[in-house]
Image (cartoon, rainbow, N blue to C red):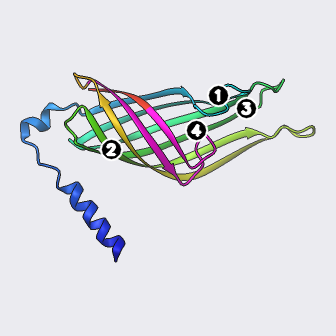
Amino acid sequence: MRKILLLLMFASFLLSNPVFSQQEMLSFPKNQIGIQLNPYLDKELFSDYMHPIAGIRYGYKFIQPIIAGVEVSGSCSYFFHHTDHIPTYNIRAGIFTRYSIPSAKRIQGFVEVSPYISHTYYIHASYDDDSGLGINKFGVYIAPGISLYSKSKKFSFDLYYKFSNLKNFNGHKSMISYKFNFNF
């Protein structure tokens, strides 16, 4: 009963966002392309292990506070201390939905939800066998965060914290992430 009451309160909060006039609805950018290209920042960054992450996304803003779209991201591991590189990579593809509040400001809080398919591949390195192993899993992440927009609102920077049911690129089920976006 308590969970239902909290869910109803949250839904009424989301639906209480002010209705915009027709002119305001047409004046905001409806398309967004986001890019992520960075090494994962953790304690292993300056040791013998590198884990770069790359991602791209496209989103469409249906109404002022809601964006929905598709995204693809991936990572590959590189171990510096091995004489032979052991290929290991992870690719994720999915859809996302984001709700921003306040939706017309230069600094916005948001909550994002994304179901995705994760494909991990690595070569099992042993003396007898160099066979590869691929693993496919279904995952979902929820990410609260903040968006910072440029004065013209053409560019934005997203900083958020992902909570997932699968392990992320850092080996944990949660991580800090960021993206740079172009809005048009």
At label 4, counting other C-alpha atoms closer than 10 Å, the crowd grade (few under 14, some 14-19, many 20 or more) is some
Residue under pointer 1? 45
Give the position of the N terminus as an image quadrant. bottom left
As measured in the structure, the alpha-carbon distance from the residue carrying label 2 to the one carrying label 4 is 25 Å
Residue positioned 26% across, 67% down in the render: 8
Disc 4 and disc 3 in contact, CB within 8 angstroms: no
The image shows residue 19 at horizontal and vertical percentages of: 11, 48
Q: Which mark is residue 96?
A: none
Q: In terms of depth relative to the viewer, which is nearer, 161 or 116?
A: 161
**Could you say which quadrant of the image residue 41 lies in?**
top right
Disc 4 and disc 1 in contact, CB within 8 angstroms: no
Residue positioned 65% across, 42% down in the render: 120
Type of residue at label 1?
Leu
Residue under pointer 2? 110
Secondary element at tag 1: loop
The image shows residue 84 at horizontal and vertical percentages of: 82, 25
Magenta residues, as a range? 154-178
Type of residue at label 4?
Ile
